[in-house]
Image (cartoon, helix red, strand yellow):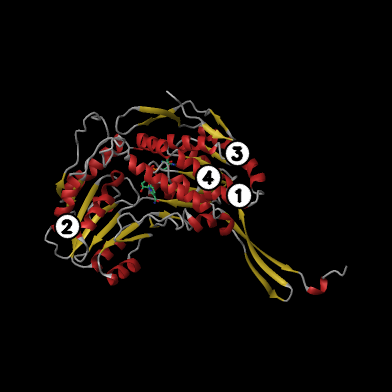
């Protein structure tokens, strides 16, 4: 069985660590590879930082217009290999092939946006702030930057950061999730061909030990983290205590509100897709669906009908609309939360537990599940489930729904379905979440916008993607210069 190597200084090198963790196909349980995880991975990281710091000296001096040239090549390579990469994502992460291709499309869009770095890094200049004195601001890179990625978007999330970091003149070390390291392994094989100098991009495998080594290393100037809120909070606290710039995206519990004036057919289809897409393992997956007013159960009936017929199975089979969850542990956790909801008084309208999927009997499958009448103080209303479970709630007014949303500790996304512009305007203004959808079920920002998040869903200031990423990966220097006319030399 292949033990994955690190990519450091332009070469594939074996880890110093002999302990490994299995990379498992969540549908078939086949072991796909082994990834080094353990104490000695900290020494791997140390070696990578040394090389990245050396490479930074030269890379930071390369003109930005030249630094983005490899990104144009990368875009082409990603497009040429999108089918192959999508298959790898589905095999190690479980989502459907179509979903895997979708996330790669978002990765490519980030590469395209980062190609605008020459413009986005341009300085601001004020002439004559005093007689003969000019002032300007320049953006300079930070140095060695690091990224820690989660399991649920192995092909996309590193691209919220990587292309911007290197376009801005930094060097970059990526630690993918140990559950899904194969996608980035293949991406780095492609990156080998784009003409980046050795040491500019590096891939170091591992788990907590690698993360802690990153957080403590004085040569690493910034950390970009995406994962659960508990670890995001930890990464932010330890990284900033060590003087680093940190952006840490956390978990979510996303509410969707549907008003009586919404187009019910369109809305319910979009909402079901938001809840069950990627088996609910999206940080922008709808989790709580709130119907406002007296809808006489029409919305519930429609959602039930859509959920019940969603085809669940192995993501590489073309008829399949929903794959498994990432691990047996994750499946058990979701099943525990469903049980908890029932014990708290919810009615289990649709039970997706223990399905039989022909040919994939050992897979981590849960079919679409619906709970209704969950008490507002219940654990299942507050806890991120990260699985294909919808909690249905009824409320009397939009104000009540907004109050409920704002009381939640997470603030990643909130969506409203309506045909009223005024209701939409009120909602987008008052709902406390970083990403708002109006008649949209997954309000994922395009690459030119920051991937926002509020409250427990984000620790930091500047987010990934777009201008925020350019600002995160650069530090501003303000220069004031005096060159009065009378000092002009006469020749
Ligand atoms: P996770 O927090 O378990 O792991 C994320 C990363 O942290 C991994 O690389 C892992 O190796 C590392 N890690 C895990 N435990 C650690 C520890 N104790 N100390 C140091 N490092 C540790 O998250 P996950 O399960 O891989 O991903 C799912 C979570 O990510 C969900 O909560 C989801 O909402 C969130 N997520 C958020 C966004 C967003 O933009 N807000 C996007 C995608 C996923």
Relative to 242, 303 lies left or right: left
Classed neighbour count for the residue bearing mark 3: other residues with Cα under 10 Å, few (<14), some (14–19), many (≥20): many
Classed neighbour count for the residue bearing mark 2: other residues with Cα under 10 Å, few (<14), some (14–19), many (≥20): some
Secondary structure of the residue carrying tag 1 is: loop
Identify the residue under disc 3: 199
Q: Residue 157 carries which label?
A: none
Ligand 1 image-quadrant field: top left
Identify the residue under disc 2: 299
Secondary structure of the residue carrying tag 3 is: loop
**As displayed, is residue 484 above or below residue 122?**
below
Residue farthest left in this picture: 296
How far apart marks 3 and 2 lie (CA) works out to 54 Å
Query: Are circles 2 and 4 on residues that touch, CB within 8 Å?
Result: no
Identify the residue under disc 4: 146
- The residue under the point 66% across, 45% down is 57
Q: Which of marks 4 and 1 is nearer the N terminus?
A: 4
């Amino acid at each position: 069985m292949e033990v994955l190597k690190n990519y450091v200084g332009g070469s594939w090198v074996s880890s110093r660590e002999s302990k490994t963790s299995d990379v498992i196909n969540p549908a078939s349980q086949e072991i796909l590879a082994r990834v080094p995880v353990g104490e000695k991975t900290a020494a791997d990281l140390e070696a990578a930082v040394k090389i990245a710091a050396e490479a930074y000296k030269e890379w930071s001096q390369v003109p930005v217009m030249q630094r983005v040239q490899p990104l144009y090549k990368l875009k082409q390579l990603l497009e040429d290999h999108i089918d192959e990469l999508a298959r790898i994502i589905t095999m190690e992460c479980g989502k459907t092939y179509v979903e895997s291709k979708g996330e790669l499309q978002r990765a490519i869009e980030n590469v395209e946006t980062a190609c605008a770095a020459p413009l986005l890094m341009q300085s601001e200049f004020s002439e004559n702030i005093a007689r003969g004195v000019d002032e300007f601001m320049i953006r300079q890179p930070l140095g060695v930057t690091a990224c820690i990625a989660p399991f649920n978007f192995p092909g996309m999330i590193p691209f919220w950061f990587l292309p911007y970091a290197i376009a801005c003149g930094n060097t970059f070390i990526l630690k993918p999730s140990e559950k899904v390291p194969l996608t980035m392994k293949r991406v780095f094989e492609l990156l080998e061909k784009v003409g980046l100098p050795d040491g500019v991009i590096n891939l170091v495998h591992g788990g907590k030990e690698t993360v802690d080594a990153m957080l403590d290393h004085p040569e690493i100037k910034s950390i970009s983290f995406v994962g659960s809120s508990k670890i995001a909070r930890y990464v932010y606290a330890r990284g900033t205590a060590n003087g680093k710039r940190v952006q840490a995206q956390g978990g979510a519990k996303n509410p969707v509100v549907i008003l009586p004036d919404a187009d019910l057919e369109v809305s319910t289809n979009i909402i079901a897709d938001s809840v069950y897409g990627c088996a609910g393992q999206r940080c922008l997956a709808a989790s709580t669906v709130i119907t406002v007013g007296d809808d006489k159960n029409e919305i519930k009936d429609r959602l039930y009908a859509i959920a019940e017929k969603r085809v669940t199975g192995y993501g590489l089979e073309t008829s399949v609309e929903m794959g498994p969850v990432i691990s047996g542990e994750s499946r058990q956790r979701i099943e525990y939360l469903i049980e908890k909801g029932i014990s708290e008084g919810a009615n289990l309208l649709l039970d997706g537990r223990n399905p039989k999927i022909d040919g994939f009997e050992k897979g981590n499958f849960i079919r679409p599940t619906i709970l209704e009448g969950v008490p507002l103080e219940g654990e299942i209303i507050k806890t991120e489930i990260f699985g294909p479970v919808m909690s249905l709630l009824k409320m009397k007014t939009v104000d009540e729904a907004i109050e409920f949303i704002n009381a939640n500790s997470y603030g990643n996304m909130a969506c409203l379905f309506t045909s009223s512009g005024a209701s939409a305007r009120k909602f987008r203004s008052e709902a406390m979440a970083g990403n708002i959808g109006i008649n949209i079920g997954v309000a994922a920002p395009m690459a030119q916008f920051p991937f926002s998040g509020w409250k427990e869903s984000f620790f930091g200031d500047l987010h990934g993607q777009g201008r925020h990423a350019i600002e995160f990966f650069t530090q501003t220097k303000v220069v004031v210069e005096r060159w009065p006319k009378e000092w002009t030399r006469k020749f």
